[in-house]
Image: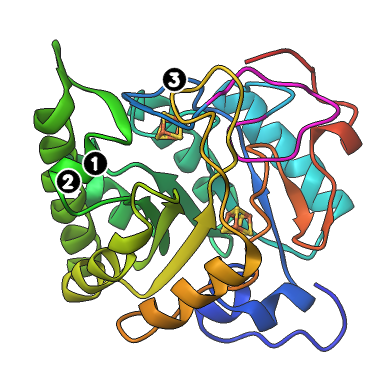
């Protein structure tokens, strides 16, 4: 902890849910979730260890035990880290056993550390009791559309068990699960942030509808993130939103939900203060490999 850090409610120790906490507290992302159960038209998880800093990028994929060891090392070097999270590089509930094992290992040793997850929300519902039992207090659900017609322009496919859905069916099934997830998490009193990737020409006129729906489900915060068009993705030709476009949409969505303004679009192996990342690249004792 840095000097004079406040210490009371979970929010006041999470640098993303409370911007003021970012002065004192940091987070670490443990990249134990390489696979995903959906395909978003903007996602590319092939990584450049050194040069890229964005969600979905990591220099290493860790086994749960390796993640627990990495956390110990990080806490020795950065005692101000108050939150351990899993944010990919894929989805934490595509292989939920890896995620739950990691959380169990951490919780056993660190009863005071805040735990946080970031998911597309497809496969969370059945694990909400586990998350509550592990005292996970924070969760982000990425919800880009509340209309299956718009969702169908964003998601290429959605896998549920042996079935791979596409088009409108895929988007409708994902939306239904996301709504159940947010409501279920709120019923267990987790703080829920909704991330929405802003894709001009696709969902930019739809942001208020997403905010309104998320607010009705009880979400606490919205994080509008401009798309990063990546080569080789279905949405590679989209022009990302300007800062003023993003600011304008945040103002309109704020009618329904408080907005996050300080997201750094972190890597899946980020560590440290939001303003001073020391990811795997700066924690050299960890093994580096491509996800
Ligand atoms: Fe990629 Fe995340 Fe979408 Fe999965 S949910 S395809 S990891 S952006
Ligand atoms: Fe926080 Fe945004 Fe970084 Fe996630 S990507 S840890 S919400 S700053």
Q: Report the mark closest to the observer, 3 or 2.
A: 2
**Gap between marks 1 and 2 measured at Cα:** 8 Å
The quadrant of the rendering that contains the N terminus is: bottom right
- Label annotation for residue 175: 2
Q: State whether the magenta stretch is mostly helix, strand or loop.
A: loop
Which circle's residue, 1 or 2, is located before the other in the chain?
A: 1
Taking the image as shown, residue 29 lies to the left or right of residue 224, namely right
Q: Are marks 1 and 2 in contact (CB under 8 Å)?
A: yes
Q: CA distance from mark 3 to mark 2?
A: 20 Å
Q: Is any atom of residue 37 visible in this view?
A: yes
Q: Please tell me whether residue 286 belongs to the stretch shown in magenta.
A: no
Q: For mark 1, what is the residue?
A: 151
**Span of residues in magenta:** 44-57
- Mark closest to the chain's N terminus, 3 or 2: 3
Q: Secondary structure at mark 2?
A: helix
Query: How far across and down, in percent of the image, does residue 237 sit?
Result: 53, 31
**Residue 34 in picture, x, y percent from top left:** 51, 21
């Amino acid at each position: 902890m840095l000097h004079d850090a406040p210490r009371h409610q979970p929010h006041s120790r999470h640098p993303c849910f409370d911007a003021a906490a970012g002065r004192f507290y940091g987070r670490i992302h443990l990249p134990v979730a390489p696979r995903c159960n959906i395909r978003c038209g903007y996602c590319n998880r092939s990584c450049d260890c050194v040069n890229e800093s964005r969600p979905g990028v990591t220099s290493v994929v860790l086994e749960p035990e390796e993640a627990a060891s990495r956390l110990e090392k990080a806490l020795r070097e950065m005692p101000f880290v108050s939150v351990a999270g899993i944010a990919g590089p894929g989805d934490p509930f595509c292989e939920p056993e890896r995620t739950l094992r990691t959380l169990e290992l951490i919780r056993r040793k660190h009863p005071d550390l805040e735990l946080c997850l970031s998911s597309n929300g497809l496969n969370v519902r059945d694990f909400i009791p586990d998350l509550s039992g592990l005292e996970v207090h924070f969760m982000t659900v990425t919800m880009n559309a509340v209309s299956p017609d718009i969702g169908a322009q964003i998601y290429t496919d959605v896998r549920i068990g042996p079935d791979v859905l596409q088009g409108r069916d895929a988007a409708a099934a994902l939306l239904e699960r996301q709504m159940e997830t947010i409501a279920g998490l709120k019923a267990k009193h987790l703080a829920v942030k909704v991330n929405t990737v802003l894709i001009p020409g696709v969902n930019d006129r739809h942001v208020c509808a997403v905010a309104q729906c998320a607010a009705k489900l009880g979400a606490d915060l919205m994080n509008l993130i401009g798309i990063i068009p990546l080569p080789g993705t279905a949405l590679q030709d989209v022009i990302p939103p300007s800062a003023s476009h993003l600011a304008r949409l945040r103002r309109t969505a704020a009618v329904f939900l408080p907005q996050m303004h300080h997201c750094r679009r972190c890597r899946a192996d980020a560590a440290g203060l939001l303003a001073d990342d020391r990811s795997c690249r700066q924690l050299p004792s960890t093994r580096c490999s491509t996800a």
